[in-house]
Image: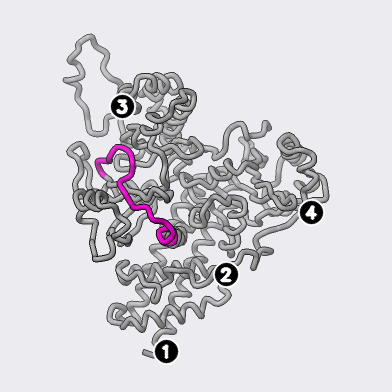
Amino acid sequence: MTTGQVSPVAYGILKGFERHFRHYSRITGEAQHFFEQGQWQQSRDAVRQRISIYEADLADVIGKIYQQMQPLQQPESFWVALKQHFLKLLNNHPQTELAETFYNSIIGRIFTHQKIDDNIMFVLPSRCYLAGQVRGKVVRVFDGNQTIGQAMAAIFDSYHLNIQLANKPRDIGNIDHYLRSRYSSQELQQMQSIEMLIPIFYRNQNAYLVGRICTGNDSIPFVIALMLNEHHQLYVDALLTEREDLSVLFGFARSYFLVDSQYPAEVVAFLQQLLPNKKHFELYIALGFYKHGKTVFYRNFIQHLEHSEDQLEVAPGIAGLVMAVFHLPSYGVVFKVIKDEFAESKKISREHVKHCYRMVKMHDRVGRMADTHEFANFRLPRVRLSSSLLSHLQDVAASSIELTEDEVIIKHLYIERKMTPLNIYLQQETDLAKAEAVIKDLGRCIKEIAAANIFPGDMLHKNFGVTRHGRVIFYDYDEICTMSERNFRYLPQSDDPYVLDSLSVAPDDVFPEQFEHFIVGKKPFKAMLKQHHPELMDPAYWRTLQQQIRQNRIHNVLPYPAERRFIV
């Protein structure tokens, strides 16, 4: 084997990645136009398109490799040399980390994810990224030795939107008033500078200017939320400075941002300073680099295994009829494996389940549906699985499990953020006011999912989770469908106690009046749900939503509390 044999393949992979990134950036770059024109459906389509192009661009590169040679006939020394040559080509590349993940995807596809070897792929990163190397290309710094109004005016003038604030003095005044009401004069006098990310963050019907106020050894997160009013005029809708609000804004239950930057590692490094509790993989995923987010997650998880001793075990909660779910108690995700056989009540197939999870991946999750990430041939140290978990997986998902002497290989796996199952939360919560707040949020969750054109299907409370912020999130997708696929019907009105027995029911029929009997179990919780959300039990409510969806009326679910909004 010679360098001449390796070089064209390595070069072809890099060029393939760069074509992909240009493709990705071209789609992302349209976000500003969509926002300025109020083209909300096109913006959502761009998010879906950006997810789809990865596999297509990957297949194009792999096809070219097969035109050059027979990959599976090459000795291992070829792949070792290929990685080293590719690494040399990446010297000073602005997207090194993303290119390494693209390379990993090539190797994974060729070897059907059977070879997880750092000698031939980037199981570990090739280098440690040091934040600040190109900081000036993604961060703009404003002088803090001026009034808040002066600083805000300079910030707004620095962003080159084709539509300007309709009432800049009012918007700057709202920001000034908020900061002075939230922070003391002494804190504001310590302001040394304001650092703002140059890229604008677009999602749904909002644009966000993201930065921080630097005050000596500390900093205040600083996010300006922009919107268009009914007259197509630009205004500041909110200012977010609480880290909890930012955590929700960049949360795992929302669609990916459209953020156009040639230096994603530097953007992520800046965001990490604003959100130190967010892991790197979560921030990459929030920016839309979900494939690289999976890579960083795997590295983080392997590192966590090396520094922990607890065992993987069956996740707490009521066992699902479709998924076997397990977790590592010391780590913040759950692992989901499709069972070999489903209960008789589940008239669905394995492919249907996969379709539903792909559907949620591509859909606007409106902050109410957990993002999931799919893995093939995920390897776990056998010694870290409890005997009860291993026995359980062999019993219910044997076709998805392969055992070696040292490893358990799961052929198809989903990971999802860990939450407290709602049924467990309600069992454990002794504060009735907190329980009622969660029940109230459960109703909002169902409504927002439905308004986004998803009917949750199985709405038992065990299929919802509660985050550490007290938000209710849906996470069981095997029975979801679009709203148009269901027929919402009234129950017949009759004194005959047997009339329901003779009711003709089609597979797509749904009777909302029965929801109260199964969404939550205990009578007090049923009463709370009916009190706060009586319309959920009314077929007319669901039919109205269907009509709005048919009219393409897009419901904008804001990722921050209503009380954060300015009155304009």
Between the C-alphas of marks 1 and 4, the distance is: 54 Å
Q: Residues within 10 Å of mark 1 (few under 14, many from 20)?
A: few
In the image, 532 versus 126, the foreground residue is 126
Q: Is residue 158 left or right of residue 481?
A: right
Q: Is residue 375 left or right of residue 495?
A: right
Principal secondary structure, stretch drawn in magenta:
loop
Between the C-alphas of marks 4 and 3, the distance is: 58 Å
Tell me which numbered mark, 1 or 3, is placed earlier along the sequence: 1
Residue depth check, mark 1 versus mark 4: number of the one nearer the observer: 4
Q: Which residue is mark 1?
A: 4
User: In what element is the residue under mark 2?
Assistant: loop
Rendered location of residue 14, percent (x, y): 47, 75
Tell me which numbered mark, 1 or 4, is placed earlier along the sequence: 1
Between the C-alphas of marks 4 and 2, the distance is: 28 Å
User: In what element is the residue under mark 4?
Assistant: strand
Tell me which numbered mark, 3 or 2, is placed earlier along the sequence: 2
Tag 3 near tag 2, CB within 8 Å: no
Tag 1 near tag 4, CB within 8 Å: no
The quarter of the displayed image where residue 4 is located: bottom left
Residue depth check, mark 4 versus mark 2: number of the one nearer the observer: 4
Q: Which residue is mark 2?
A: 94
Rendered location of residue 528, percent (x, y): 42, 21
Q: Which residues are magenta?
A: 302-322
Residue depth check, mark 3 versus mark 2: number of the one nearer the observer: 3
Q: Which residue is mark 3?
A: 518
The reply to whether residue 53 is visible in this rendering is no
- Image quadrant where one finds the N terminus: bottom left
Rendered location of residue 39, percent (x, y): 54, 46
Q: Residues within 10 Å of mark 2 (few under 14, many from 20)?
A: some
Between the C-alphas of marks 1 and 3, the distance is: 66 Å
